Image: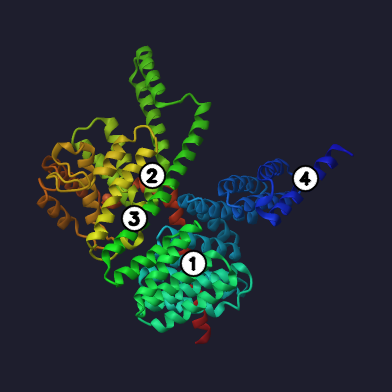
Amino acid sequence: MSATAEASEALDAAIGEIALALKSGAAADQEGIEVTALKLADSCDNREIRVLAILDAGRFFYVTGRPEVGIRIAEMAKSFALETAQVAATITAYNLIGVCSADSGDLPRAMEAYAEGLNLARRAGDAVQEAKLLGNTGVALNYAGLFRESKACLQKVVALGEVDPDFAVMVRNAYAGIALCCLHLDEIGPGIAAIEKCIALSIEPTDAHSIQNRVLAENYYSRLLIEIGDFDGAWRHARAARQFANKSKSPRAEIQASVAEGLAEAFSGNLDVGLSRLTATLARAQELKLPQREVLVALVKALEYAGRHDEALKYLQEMLAQQRQTAEANVLHHVHQHLLQLHSADADSPIEDVKQIMRRMETHVEVIEGRAAKIELIKQKQELFRARIEAMERLAVAAELRDDSTGEHSYRVGRMACLLAKEAGCDDETIFMIDIAARLHDVGKIGIPDGILLKPGKLNGSERLVMEMHAEIGADVLVKSEIPHIRMAEEIARHHHERWDGTGYPAKIGGREIPLAVRITTLADVYDALTHKRPYKEAWTAEASLSEILSLRGTHFDPELTDLFLALVSRLRREHRDLDHHLGEAARASPFIQARGKIWETLKLAKDEYQQQFQRTMDLQR
Ligand SMILES: [Fe+2]
Ligand SMILES: [Fe+2]
């Protein structure tokens, strides 16, 4: 046999092996498949089949719960598809990178991949891929707590589905997602309309996956009906959820059904029965090591309804502890990955670590005695710091996106803090560090449940206590990250709600005991929060915000810094017609925020097209 024939036979075998592995599931030899996928990427014949096989291999790792390997292989498929100009496969690869990243908890990366994919799909006029990507983006946004934006994405899927009846399944799932968003956004009427459409589109489900989806849909329906006081209806749909759950025999579906039943019972007069069912469901979820979040949410809701606030708080804290654990695990995991990457990149570059740079900097300065060389080395050191902090920064933005949908708040605070540091006479290095460290001030918000973070209006006592924990959560996450030079960021995260008079939290320190970088950031943070709209408050005018800050001089804020700050803001407002735009420059350079921007553009574009189409119809009917 010739060498080429032999190679092509080996490749055919490899492709077969991957197909088989996908069918048989987790039992297959996972390392073998990764090696095979690598081999496939190396060869250039039969490019269409090859790229599909590599994508299959990636999907295999996604399905079998190893999304990190899935991402690696999907990246490989993407490069190969790009090299060989295969557009459809490139889009599929982006989608796979997205779902794997979302599955491993790296939402920022998922959003970036979806945005790239969406862009390509739109340009290629591929509506099926576009709908798939939008559906997945909607799910990712939902996880991130960005319900309004998630809803917009899913509505676009529905609009695409109206054009092409082949999208029925995607449209049905999109309606379920919209209903869940509405439940969180307190838009009960539209939520009920969406879930009714979802259920109307469901034929009697037969396979495990669609039965499980139906249980979820019945669960949402039941919870929505509770919100309008239709307890009979809630009961009916909770019972429907139970029937489908019995059919599916999946423990996950069973827990979903029990949550719907427990809530329906608690709200229709059988409080104790409902509560004991929910408590038992929680125990069962714990025993099966299944996610407990939904059960805890239901318990808190039922206990609050019963007026048993102390117990509600207990479960709320448990929810928080769990969320904190997974959030921390995710944060640390990604930071670790990022450091590993940096480490391998460092291996052949002259920058091993900061200490070495410092040493080299000293020798250089001795030898060359040139200011230029010194600046160059400081720049290198700053670059290294910036690279190390980048992973944290993306997470901080992801945390913040839940209550500031533009994601620019933390960047504006960093920029403003750095300008104030300059006014306060800090040295160049401190000024640089404050800009970046202050961006992380609210990273601890990843640990705060949506119900509290996004609650419109005032928080009650126990909710406030939970909210205040974001300072310590953030500091803990940063300490554990083991990133060098993180100390300033940790101090800022921990103490940015302390007050000059010692009445803040969490440590109740005051005066100069609060580190300077923290006192600076506090001013920038409060001003920015006051001047912008949040789910719980309207935006204040600059004038009102400045006079509020002046009134808190010496109680909340360092008096000397307050004077510098007020002068600084007046000057900046004279110099820049759009101060927000100026301060948010770094945000717009962030690839994650750019990815979000691209998605919104796509959505807007699609909406305009839809409207044009609508108007054309109007013209025809005239
Ligand atoms: Fe904060
Ligand atoms: Fe903030």
Alpha carbons under labels 2 and 4: distance apart: 42 Å
Of the image marks 3 and 4, the number of the one nearer the N terminus? 4
| Residue that carries the numbered disc 1 in the rendered image | 255
Q: Residue at x 37, y 22 (%)?
A: 358
**Residue 11 marker:** 4
Give the residue type that dot 1 points to: Ile
Specify whether residue 160 is in view. no
Q: Residue furthest bottom?
A: 622
| Of labels 2 and 3, the one closer to you | 3
**Residue 448 marker:** 3
Q: Are marks 3 and 4 in contact (CB under 8 Å)?
A: no
Horizontal side of 554 relative to 283 (left or right) equals: left
Q: Is residue 294 above or below residue 190?
A: above
| Pick the front one: 295 or 85 | 295
Of the image marks 2 and 1, the number of the one nearer the N terminus? 1
Mark 2: few, some, or many residues within 10 Å (few <14, many ≥20)? many
